[in-house]
Amino acid sequence: MKRHLPILLLTLFLSLFAHVNAADKPALIPRPFRTVWTDDTFVLKKGDIIGCDRSPQALSEAEYLQESLFRLTGIRPDIRQGEKGRIRIVRKKGQRGGYRLEVTGRHILLTGSDHEGIAGGIATLRQIIRDTAIPGVVIDDAPRFGWRGFHLDCSRHFFSKEEVKRYIDLMALYKFNRFHWHLTDDQGWRIEIKQLKALTDKSSLRTPNHQDSVCMAMAAKSHNDDLLLPAEKFVVSGSDSLYGGYYTQDDVREIVAYALGRGIETIPEIDMPGHMLAAIEAYPHLSCHGTGSQGKVFSSPLCPSKDAVRTFCQTVWNEVVPLFPFEYVHLGGDEVEKEFWKACPDCQKRMAESGLKNEDELQAWFFHDMERYINRLGKKIIGWDEIIQGGLSKTATVMWWRSWMPHTVSEATRQGNRVIVNPIAPFYFSETEKPGSLRDIYDFKVVPDGLSARQRQLVMGVQGNLWTEWTPSFNRLMYMLFPRALALSELAWCGDGEKDFDDFSRRVTAHYDVLNRMDVAYHIPFLQNLWQTRAFTDSIRVETNCEDPTAVVRFTTDGSVPTVQSPILSNPVVINRTTAFTFRPFGKGGRAGDISRASYVKQGLLAALPHPDDLRQGLTVRRYEYEGKTCRTIGQSREMSVVQVDDVVIPEGMKGNIGLIIEGYIDIPADGIYTFALTSDDGSLLFIDGNTVVDNDREQSPHKEVGQVALKRGLHAIEVRYFDQNGGMLRLQVSDENQHILHPRDLYRRTSATN
């Protein structure tokens, strides 16, 4: 609150005179610190003037505002430097990134503390404007974090210059201010290096690979053309049709300038020494063995022992650095397959000569060598959190991405290094959106507990990452990005005490219309009230709804995928026999959302089992040595141990490649229909009396599936199967028809089951 105290007093004074229903006004994301709507209206007219000072920076800001007004209203005001118009941009000292926007019947006055603040104020104005009549308002605002980033991987799948600019424009609308541009990886080299022409001549195009074929298979399965590789990204070379593209250095300059005009700095990433297969395919001598190949997990890296490799890297950075006039570049440093170095005589010789104990120290040696070179070019480096291994220089910044390394922020800041927070869960937007994703992002604690005041200051902010292995088109990119980016926007901008998820959810609903007007192919919200299995004994009302008011829900009952010709579920459908429904929401222009399937099963109450004499509270857990990717074959592996637990959980201390079979009984207190919600990371299955009730069996981050079954009062056999490759999470919640949750004391095991 202290950061806003001067503007707070003025805003409270203004609020005494403003009697406007804010609910009728545009919904703003991220929510400004203080907003006061008034009864005034500014009517934009032809011949209006944008006034600003005579600096080149002010002219750039005025041009951004001019373009925004023209897009939204069709009116393009003139720009007059050194003059006052009805629309004015004024620079005034204040908090970094802060601004004040005042719209009255007579003028629009935007006051910003710096270029970023002016850009933020224009972003807010873009959200307010619907037509030439602009509602009166006074907004005082400033961001919580200085780093509000978004990342885009253009290697796995390529996006054109115009698509990248559109991506940046949407970032600006929601006040992101750092564009992390992932330009190279195993699947493609996307930036022109004039002294190394083979990088783009040979490695910017490819024959369709495994990731491409997976996307095409997904497109066919889901009837979704957004998962197809766009035809315009192919070129014909002889008898081959090759996919890809790259950015010339002029393209890069244009994109960097476009982003900067919107208050966004662009940070290039050239990932090394791993994720370099595209470079090695162009210049095979860069690897340890003169060729590129796939290792056990990752691809063959650069050979750090060769002087020619370091010369290559320096040549790349010599051309990249001048294109990005900002403080940082990203050096990567993640997921290096060091097995290649163990088998490389040159690497082993280098380690012996330099007194390096192992390959981890060899990576740190290479990374620090490259960092020193980049420092000489006038830049600081950012690296993925693996760069902590082997020690950090004083100027290196760490991106914490590995969710399973929760002490990274504390460790790096304790050493005095800055940190950017972007762990996989929940900030990898390449992960499929799930119910609850918005809340997971919105409520994430960016600054962990236990940090000193000095350490907290070293947390620069937060970032979302969008890797594109399974994202081949711009529409699919938008689907992965929105609406989750809205939650990240508010998390990055607003202080913890300024957030309200319920209010945010209402504003998100309003922004579906905003996104529709910009033709953004966002993820249509999940349908409500749909479970894998709904049980009933007589008849049941089939109903669902979508939080997007612009969407309609269509359905089929014959197993086919709904199309725009399928019936609309506008009112509940009553059924009295077992029926399998397939639902799909459709948005603007008939754009299809996700397919949902739900089985409505007419059942008799399953009879209770006889009561064994040797029951004890709890369940029996059998652990198996297991590296499979489905629960169904767990019991075929070698049994490692048998333990008891009080609930459906992973027993304490169990991690790694695990397969569990949890068995026992559940005591049902009364006849009725019971709901079983099973959440797991990775896969799980639930059986009641041998019947599959919940199928959550897949590799995944934490995900919940729900099923129902009709049960008679008494004991029923329960079995849960679970697998995971790194010891994730498992939870089961059971409730009756009145939403009363059953207690773990209702779970039992037979003592003979442990023998």
Image (cartoon, rainbow, N blue to C red):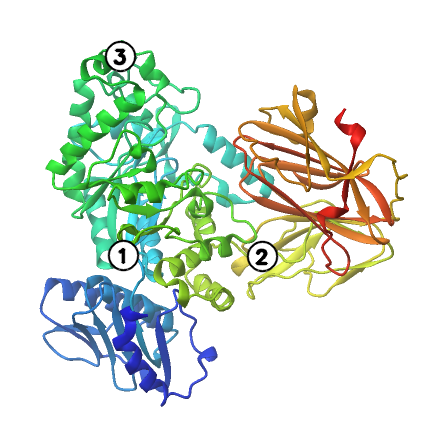
Q: From where the camera sits, is residue 636 visible?
A: yes
Residue at position x 18%, y 45% in the image = 324
Q: Is residue 435 left or right of residue 360?
A: right
Q: Is residue 634 left or right of residue 481?
A: right
- Mark 3 element type: helix
- Mark 2 element type: strand
Q: Which of the marked residues, 3 or 1, is nearer the chain's N terminus?
A: 1
Given residues 248 and 7, the one toward you in this image is 7
Q: Which residue is mark 2?
A: 586
Q: Which residue is mark 1?
A: 146
- Mark 1 element type: loop
Q: CA distance from mark 2 to mark 3?
A: 59 Å
Dividing the picture into quadrants, the one containing residue 537 is bottom right
Q: CA distance from mark 3 to mark 1?
A: 43 Å
Q: Which residue is mark 3?
A: 348
Dividing the picture into quadrants, the one containing residue 651 is top right
Quadrant of the image for the C terminus? top right
| Residue type marked 1 | Gly
Local packing at callout 3 (Cα closer than 10 Å; few below 14, some 14-19, many 20+) is some
Q: Which mark is in front, 2 or 1?
A: 1
Q: Is residue 734 left or right of residue 730?
A: right
648 lies above or below 58: above
